[in-house]
Image: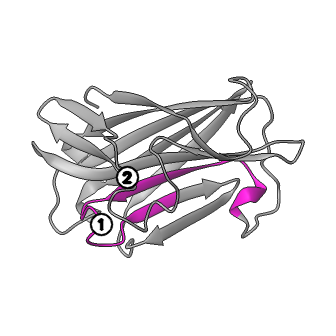
Amino acid sequence: MAAASAGPIGNSVRDAPLDDDDLSAAFRVGYDVSQNRLLVAVEIIDDSFVIPDQPSDDRTHADGCELYLDVTHGQGSGVQLARWGTVMSVQGDAREIRYGVESSVHPRRRVYEWWVDVSTLGPGLQLEPSVDIGFDVAVEDRDADNSFTWTSWGPRTQKLEGNRRLGDWTYEFERALTTSGDPA
């Protein structure tokens, strides 16, 4: 894996976290050119884990993590990959997408590790200089007191519904850059 870029996740919607112990999150983006994979690690500090045994169609029922990718920058629908508790969800233009996610739980900390085969995001897409991918990461935090927070790296919700709701991840030679810009 090549060098990674990193960023905080903190544009909250619904019940704002009480403090950094209640919820704080950050991500790192890396890549593996030999396998043409984008790699995203999300680390979450959380004082109350909620992962029910029974799956639910309600994404607010559990802690979770979402990854948004769009190579068309709003010309297509983009892709949302999500893990809400034990439920996996893929939304948008993801007919052929190849990806994986692993999660691990440690005392007061959760980690999600995603990989996405970049060639399945667009015809013949390869990690090469100046490849630019619309990008965002979101975290869901359901707490034992029944509060719920959805927080993302970039501003706004409904990430697949417009071309100014995602930031950009750009592959440039031997380093990765992320910029959220100001989509306002």
Q: Nearer the viewer, residue 164 or 72?
A: 164
Q: Quadrant of residue 53?
A: bottom right
At mark 1, the secondary structure is loop
Residue 68 forms part of the magenta stretch: yes
Q: CA distance from mark 1 to mark 2?
A: 9 Å
| Identity of the residue drawn at 42% across and 30% down | 7
Residue 43 placed where, x, y %? 56, 31
The residue beneath circle 2 is: 166
Q: Nearer the viewer, residue 16 or 41?
A: 16
**Neighbour class for label 1 at 10 Å: few (<14), some, many (≥20)?**
some
Residue 104 placed where, x, y %? 63, 36
| Identity of the residue drawn at 88% across and 42% down | 144
Q: Residue pushed farthest front?
A: 184
Kind of residue indicated by mark 2: Leu
| Identity of the residue drawn at 11% across and 33% down | 173
Residue 137 placed where, x, y %? 47, 46
The residue beneath circle 1 is: 74
Magenta-highlighted residues: 59-81
Kind of residue indicated by mark 1: Gly
